[in-house]
Amino acid sequence: MFDVPVVLMIYNRPELTRQVFSAIRMIRPATLFIIADGPKNEADAVLCAAARQAVTAVDWPCQVHRLYAAENMGVARRPLTGLNQVFQQVEAAIILEDDTLPDLSFFEFCRELLNHYKHDPSILLIGGTNLCGHIDIQAAYGTSRFYLPPWGWASWRRSWQQYDFTMHDWAQFKSKWALQVPETFAFWETFLDRYSQKLSSWDVQLCYTLWRTKTKAIIPKQNLVRNLGYHAQATFTKLSKSFVLDLPLQSCTLPLEHPLAKTPDLDTLIEPKVIRFLEEIMQFNQRSGIVLNH
């Protein structure tokens, strides 16, 4: 029995939901939260019902919390409200979405590091995605202040309490951030200005929390989570081609090899990949005139 609570966020993609739920089912968590957004219309209701049906086969001893919205709250608000409920009830959790398929070693990776860094406020979250695919370091992980997209991650209540959905202090924080990333500040200023006004996501704010609190995300040496959601029906990842699609899904070696001294800082490797990912999404959405919501 896996002793760390697992969260699965779903919406209206039953086939993808079924695949990710199958991975969760293999590790048999003792506590499972399922966060579901509600449908937009009658046609959407059929798909939402099918997605919820895909996670009914909990055939192991498990405390299941089904946090199902009756109405559509949107791609930004529903994760926010759902995770608020989760961290009101548990101290730590592993979070997956319906299109984030983890290698099974991802769960133990998160479990070990949630315990290892439980009382270390310099670590905000544990990531499962490595946009580089693989990084040649001795330890099983490094750290970075850049973690987007959060395709498979884990964190603590103490970290979520610092999360600010509205990014209310972005305007004041700009001058500090300009000094920290002088070469890429123009990109981040444009990007954060846009999202702080529209609040059309929840994960951008998670990355911003890393910057504002001067904390780090753990990045695994190898990519532990594959995104299954690159298709025309996706909310953001509608591209048919992306470097992300070529990322291998690998297993980490257990038990984890922790850094002997200073944890490797992976900013110079991770930031260009994050910017490349975001530029792909923004350019496609701008060409297509897509409104960023469900």
Image (cartoon, grey):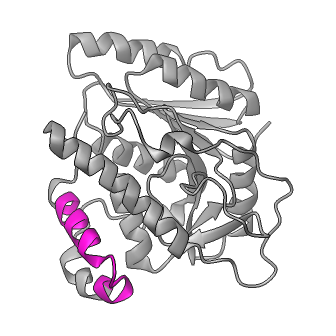
**Where, quadrant-wise, is the C terminus in this rendering?**
top left
Image position, residue 53 (x, y; %): 49, 13
Left or right: 17 with respect to 47?
A: right
Q: Nearer the viewer, residue 218 or 115?
A: 218
199 on left or right of 27: left
Above or below 73: residue 195: below
Boundaries of the magenta span: 177-196
Would residue 1 appear left or right of 23 to someone viewing this image?
right
Outermost residue toward the right?
255
Residue found at x 66% / y 41%: 249
Q: Establish if 284 lies above or below 195.
A: above
The number of numbered discs placed on residues in the rendered structure image is 0
Q: Quadrant of residue 122?
A: bottom right
Residue beneath the point at 26% across and 37% down: 74
For residue 49, which quarter of the picture? Answer: top left
Instruction: Tell me, yes or no, if residue 50 can be seen here.
Output: yes
Query: Residue 4's spot in the image, x, y percent?
Result: 69, 47
**Residue that appears at 28% across and 70% down:** 188
Q: Tell me: residue 290, above or below residue 17.
A: below
Quadrant of image for the N terminus: top right
Q: Main secondary structure of the magenta part?
A: helix
In the rendered image, residue 76 lying in the magenta stretch gets the answer: no
Q: Is residue 234 left or right of residue 55?
A: left
**Residue 13, x across and y down, in percent:** 42, 21
